[in-house]
Image (tube, grey):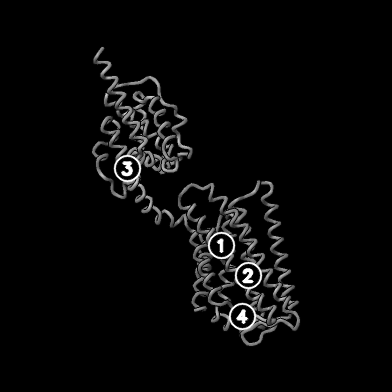
């Protein structure tokens, strides 16, 4: 099992590294591509060396098995160093500081490599069977070596995770954001993987030795990390193919959820339909996003066309009703918008126009509506309030009484 998981994880990293190097060769290459490829190459090679089958083969080539242990750890430290360089490209500092930060992080990596080498040599490691054994009384030195590796790796992962999370917050929904989230998961899994190596430090202190190679838990964590990291780095290539069907399903569901609001507007304002035939048909998956975009525009056009029929009292009545209702059970922003629309439709049916319009600021959603998905989500909330809110029902009852009273007054006059 250890052979299989270690080999699979190494294969994922190495194939990705080779692919990245091949696709970026020639011309002016972004350092970020080299850093990503360097991380994958170092991590994949280290994991390959830890596979038991490879370790057995290398016993005949390397001077001693403990040399393989040193080489594996140094490759892992190099892989961690590439992570902090990747972080600089994901969330770069000011241009004048970027080169300085890169040099500092490279120097830190070299110092860690040198310190790790010194600790390993100072521990006087020899190989006894399947274990690496420190010289008598030097188990703590070998433990320091393992703690240095785990600590440096976790620091590098922390720096990377911070950069990825900040960039994720600034990135709109899409394949790139999906990739960044996968990278965050990969960093979290890798941190657990690095901390798992502290069991070697405990064995160093207790017994002055540690096993060669990795156990099943470690190689499994490595495989999960490899899959998540590779998936995150390539999300822009495969993300749209995976997420497109989900986006279309969400668009069709939103299109259906907007039906009651659109129908209420269309009944009084049939001219809002950009394509009357398509408007009354349920769209297929391939046309769902375009159909949702058209429906949002039609609803917005209908709301604008109702401005002549909007009445300031409707907003006042809705706010009074909200004050009496349970605030936790309501969506005040959507309820106010739905109440104004419902009252305007009632005035439209009665042919009653008004010169004043309700305060727009009190009806504007606090969330920024930057995309069609944002607009659709907001209008779905308004539709839900139009159908289910008692406040909207109360406003509509008062508006009908108001219209009826106005009609009676006109009749007497």
In the rendered structure, the answer to whether residue 408 lies left or right of residue 111 reads left
- The one nearer the camera, 339 or 109, is 339
| Residue identified by numbered label 2 | 75
Disc 1 is placed on an element classified as helix
Q: Earlier in the sequence, mark 1 or mark 3?
A: 1
- The one nearer the camera, 136 or 8, is 136
- Sort mark 4 into few (<14), some (14-19) or many (20+) by Cα contacts within 10 Å: many
**Mark-to-mark CA distance, 2 and 3:** 53 Å
Disc 4 is placed on an element classified as loop
- Would you identify the image quadrant in which residue 280 lies? top left
Q: Can residue 301 be seen at all in this image of the molecule?
A: no
How far from the left and from the top, in percent, is residue 282? 26, 45
Disc 3 is placed on an element classified as helix
How far from the left and from the top, in percent, is residue 126? 69, 83
| Residue identified by numbered label 3 | 291
Residue found at the far bottom of this picture: 129
Disc 2 is placed on an element classified as helix
In the rendered structure, the answer to whether residue 357 lies left or right of residue 283 reads right
For image coordinates 34% across by 27% down, the residue present is: 306
| Residue identified by numbered label 1 | 188
In the rendered structure, the answer to whether residue 12 lies left or right of residue 131 reads left
Compared with 183, 329 (above or below) is above
**Mark-to-mark CA distance, 4 and 2:** 16 Å
Q: Are marks 4 and 2 in contact (CB under 8 Å)?
A: no
How far from the left and from the top, in percent, is residue 15? 50, 67
- Would you identify the image quadrant in which residue 354 lies? top left
- Sort mark 3 into few (<14), some (14-19) or many (20+) by Cα contacts within 10 Å: many
Tell me the mark number nearer the camera, choosing from 2 and 3.
Answer: 3
Q: Earlier in the sequence, mark 4 or mark 2?
A: 2
**Mark-to-mark CA distance, 2 and 1:** 20 Å
């Amino acid at each position: 099992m250890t052979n299989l998981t270690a080999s699979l994880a190494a294969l994922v990293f190495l194939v990705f590294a080779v692919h990245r190097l091949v696709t970026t060769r020639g011309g002016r290459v972004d350092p970020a591509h080299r850093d990503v490829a360097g991380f994958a190459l170092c991590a994949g090679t280290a994991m390959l060396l830890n596979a038991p089958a490879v370790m057995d083969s290398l016993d005949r080539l390397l001077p001693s098995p403990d040399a393989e242990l040193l080489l594996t750890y140094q490759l892992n430290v190099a892989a961690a160093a590439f992570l902090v360089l990747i972080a600089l490209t994901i969330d770069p500092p000011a241009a004048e500081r970027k080169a300085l930060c890169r040099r500092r992080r490279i120097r830190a990596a070299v110092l860690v490599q040198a310190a790790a080498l010194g600790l390993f040599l100072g521990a006087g490691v020899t190989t006894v069977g399947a274990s690496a054994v420190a010289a008598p009384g030097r188990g703590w030195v070998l433990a320091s070596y393992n703690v240095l590796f785990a600590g440096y790796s976790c620091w590098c992962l922390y720096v990377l995770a911070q950069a990825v999370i900040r960039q994720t917050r600034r990135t709109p929904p899409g394949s790139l954001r999906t990739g960044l989230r996968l990278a965050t998961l990969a960093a979290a899994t890798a941190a657990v993987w690095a901390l798992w190596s502290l069991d070697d430090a405990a064995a160093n202190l207790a017994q002055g030795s540690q096993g060669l190679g990795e156990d099943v838990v470690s190689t499994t964590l490595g495989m999960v990390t490899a899959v998540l990291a590779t998936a995150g780095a390539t999300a822009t290539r495969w993300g749209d193919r995976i997420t497109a069907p989900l986006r279309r399903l969400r668009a069709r569901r939103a299109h259906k959820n907007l039906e009651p609001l659109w129908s209420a507007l269309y009944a009084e304002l049939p001219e809002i339909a950009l394509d009357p035939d398509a408007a009354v048909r349920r769209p297929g998956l391939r046309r769902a996003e375009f159909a949702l975009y058209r429906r949002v525009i039609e609803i917005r056009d209908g709301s604008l066309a109702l401005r002549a029929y909007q009445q300031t009292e409707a907003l006042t009545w809705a706010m009074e009703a909200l004050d009496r209702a349970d605030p936790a059970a309501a969506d005040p922003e959507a309820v106010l918008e739905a109440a104004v629309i419902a009252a305007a439709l009632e005035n439209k049916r009665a042919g009653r126009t008004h010169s004043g319009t309700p305060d727009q600021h009190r009806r504007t959603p606090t969330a920024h509506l930057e995309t069609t998905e944002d607009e659709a989500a907001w209008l779905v909330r308004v539709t839900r309030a139009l159908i289910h809110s008692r406040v909207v029902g109360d406003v509509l009852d008062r508006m009908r009484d108001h219209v009826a009273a106005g009609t009676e007054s006109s009749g007497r006059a």
